[in-house]
Image (cartoon, rainbow, N blue to C red):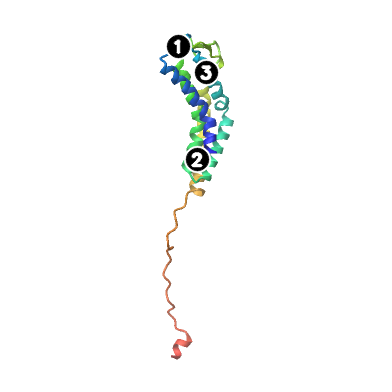
Amino acid sequence: MWCLCATLLLGPSVLVWLVRLSALAMGCEPGPDLCRTMAVGGGLRDALELAWLLGSHALVSFAIACVAGVVALRLHRPLMASLSVMILPLAALALPTLAVHTALYSGCEANEAGVGDCLLWGAQMGMSFHRAAIAPWIVYAAVPYCFALALLFGAVGLLFFRSRPEPLARPFTWPRFERAAKTFDDLKN
């Protein structure tokens, strides 16, 4: 279940980077021309739209990250729970934003107002590039909540969901002291 939540948040971002790295591997410079007679820009645009679908909605990404954190707590992994809540929502936004910024060229600029349409590797990028200009503001707004949730999940995990050490073969007990007083039967003899 944790892998499913991580895939939902990070899978589209990884897909964006796969398209971007494939264009780099083919030796394509960012520009309006086709990349070795292939419209790689269309794949990048579609992957970006998929990445913005969950990543740009902070409440949805927080909910998925919290589910991942609860699953990690159930596995008695408090650090994994804390890091899941802190890193997954932020990485879902930061990774596609970095991919867009590596693909910008002069004449193709991403702006918050959504003015202009960029042509990259034979495809119109539309709003997929302009959303990368808005993403840092979402990251800045989400960071305090991510850290607060990470502290909460970490504290709850360390208090209640730590893995217990294995029990010893024979538990330690204090030696019992024999009674010092004598009973009536002992005095008769």
For the residue marked with disc 3, what is the amino acid? Gly
User: What residue is pinned by disc 3?
Assistant: 43
Q: Which mark is residue 89?
A: none
State the image coordinates of residue 119 (x, y, percent, origin top left).
Answer: 51, 10
Q: Residue at x 45, y 11 (%)?
A: 36
User: What residue is pinned by disc 2?
Assistant: 81
For the residue marked with disc 1, what is the amino acid? Arg
Which numbered disc, 2 or 1, marks the residue closer to the eye?
1
State the image coordinates of residue 16 (x, y, percent, origin top left).
Answer: 49, 22
Would you say residue 26 is visible in this rendering? yes
User: What residue is pinned by disc 1?
Assistant: 36
Badge 2: how crowded within 10 Å, few (<14), some, or many (20+)?
many
Label 1, label 3: how far apart the Cα atoms are:
14 Å
Q: Is residue 83 above or below residue 176?
A: above
Label 3, label 2: how far apart the Cα atoms are:
33 Å
Which numbered disc, 3 or 2, marks the residue closer to the eye?
3
